[in-house]
Amino acid sequence: MPPRGYLKRLREICDKHGILLIFDEVITGFGRLGTAFGADFYGVVPDMLTFAKCVTNGVIPLGGVICRDKLYDAVMAAHADSPAHAIEFFHGYTYSGHPVACAAAIATLDVYRNDKLLSVPPRWAGCWATPCTANSRACRT
C-alpha cells in the first residue's frame, strides 16, 4: 500500500505538468479494498482507470477502460468528420465486446449492486494495510 497522501500528491504533480494519471485497477477494483475501486479508497480521481477480471466474477475474460470526460471529448472531437458508423475509439482485442462476456459482466454488476457488495468492506481488507507474513494474523483466513 502506498504511504498516506502519496496518490493525492501524485495527482497534484500530474495536474501541474499535464501528465495523465492512469490507475490499473485489475487487482484493486470491485471491492477488494472495501470500495468500488482503489481510486475511491484513496480519494483520488485518475484520468483513466483500467479494470478486468472481477467485472465478470473472473469467469469470462473481459476488461475495460473508464476515462474522464475531457479525454472522451477529445477522442470524439478528433473523429467529428468520420461517418456515423465509424468506431471512434477502436481498441479491438481478442475478447472485445463478446456478447457472453458482456452478459456475464451485467449479471455480475447486478449482484454487486443488489447485494450491496461494494458498500461492505471485505473481511480481508485489513490484510492489505498490514504487511503479510507467515505469522500475520491479518492475512489468515
Image (cartoon, rainbow, N blue to C red):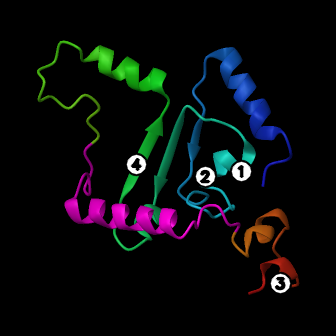
Looking at the rendered structure, the kind of residue marked 1 is Phe
Where's residue 5, x and y in %?
A: 84, 39
In the image, 116 versus 6, the foreground residue is 116
Where's residue 4, x and y in %?
A: 86, 45
Judge depth for marks 4 and 3 and give the one in front. 4
Task: Please report the bounds of the magenta region as a residue range.
Answer: 92-121
The quarter in which the C terminus is drawn is bottom right
Residue tagged 1: 41
Judge depth for marks 3 and 2 and give the one in front. 2
Nearer-N-terminus badge (4/2): 2
Residue tagged 2: 37
Q: Secondary structure at mark 2?
A: loop
Q: Are marks 2 and 1 in contact (CB under 8 Å)?
A: yes
Nearer-N-terminus badge (4/3): 4
Nearer-N-terminus badge (1/3): 1
Looking at the rendered structure, the kind of residue marked 2 is Phe
Residue tagged 4: 64
Q: Secondary structure at mark 1?
A: helix
Q: Within 10 angstroms of label 3, few (less than 14), some, or many (20 or more) residues?
A: few
Looking at the rendered structure, the kind of residue marked 4 is Gly
